[in-house]
Image: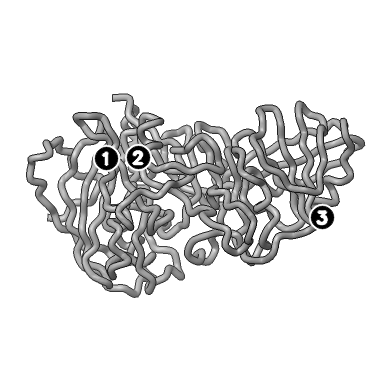
Amino acid sequence: MTRPMGRVRAVAVSAATVITTTTMMLGMGAGQADAVGRVRVADGVTVAPGITYQSFSVTASHGTVTGHVVTADLRDRHVSVGLLSPGKVAARAKLSQLVAAQGAVAGVNADFFNIDETQHPGVQATGSAVGPAISDGVALKAAVPNGQRFGPGLPPGTSTRDVIGVGYDHKARLDELTLDGTVRARKGKRFDLEGLNQYAVAEGGIGAFDSHWGDVSRRRAVCGTDTLRAAACTTDAYEVTVRDGRVVSQSDTIGAGAIEPGTVVLVGREAGAAELRTLRMGERVRVSDKLRSTSGKRLKFAVGGYPVLRDGAPLPGLDTKAVATRTGAAIGDNGRLLHLLVLDGTAEAGAGLTIAELAGVFQAVGAEDGVNLDGGGSSTLVTRDAVSGAPVVRNHPTGGAERAVPEGIGLFSRG
């Protein structure tokens, strides 16, 4: 009997209950060269009203892969989706800690992030994510240039601005978020803003850092280029601090330290540095920033994601060779179902999924759109224990322990 994940009636079971499995054929889409076998899916276990957990296995190109998926029914008004965060963009924590601290009932890790800086000795890694992030309708950060990202190569026609999000209409969707920002000063002086709380600012651009950033050094923002992450840090950089609408400090050295509410630090490189040098101490400056969606919809939650499935079909150019432990998120039923999926950390022993195979699994669960998220040692899925209320790591993370991450996708229930 074939039953798509997320449409199976949730069955509450105790830990001692034997979970039966169903089998479904994994549909193959255009552009997928890998033959994949059957997906075996356990019956659903209710985590909270409108939220169901299941385990599954799939025979893929490199062996049998086990995984875990949580499905949220967004038609249920008890259910909401939010950003799991340590409280600052440039900070990390274990997913189980984020789930517990924010009162989520389930969650997975999210976007790829700036985990190390071996390419720039002496420069502090920020731990911040690649793509945009919105939490409770507030824009926390924008996307780094494509060439500055971490993770597998992007499919044609996609970028670091791609996100998976949920709008105020309570529907999940794939979208694209572009920063619309300006720096305005006296006599009609106006500069475009090229960054918001990003670990990398576009060449010749100006980036803004505010209280959401944290206390980590902003030096990484002027390293690399738009096409080469490993390129040297520029020596032509400038920093201006604006507090309560006035310039209060200027420096050729890019600094660190917490940024107070009401304060914005502007970091410019090359042409952007030259523009910032025209500002004067005490000068009135207005900084504005907004993330605009391509769809025109207002997003209450959004996080960066690598698109692999759109309108029910895998994107062209997906990799069919490299296998890895994967994390993903997929959307079904015209935005009313959100699936959060994680594999067990076995790819290093030869089992795992290619990007194309991940898209195929999304098709099997009845999804229309889906994204690949940070995998490998970051892959973690957590649900709340029905009895104790404590967070439980459902998968087996690579290396046997959780990795601290900068953000996650959290599921919440008022029931």
> Which of the two discs, 3 and 1, labels the residue nearer the N terminus?
3
Residue at label 3? Answer: 271
List x then y, in percent, for residue 288: 72, 36
List x then y, in percent, for residue 270: 80, 57
Q: CA distance from mark 3 to mark 1?
A: 49 Å
Q: Is residue 14 visible?
A: yes
Instruction: State the SS at label 2.
Output: helix
Callout 2 touching callout 3 (CB < 8 Å): no
Residue at 36% from the left image edge and 58% from the top image edge: 326
List x then y, in percent, for residue 84: 44, 38
Instruction: Name the amino acid type tagged 2.
Output: Ser
Residue at 64% from the left image edge and 55% from the top image edge: 123
> Which of the two discs, 2 and 3, labels the residue nearer the N terminus?
2
Image side of residue 198 versus residue 29, left or right:
right
Residue at 67% from the left image edge and 47% from the top image edge: 218
Residue at label 1? Answer: 392
Residue 248 lies in quadrant: top right
Q: Which mark is residue 96?
A: 2
Q: CA distance from mark 2 to mark 3?
A: 43 Å
Residue reaching furthest to the right: 187
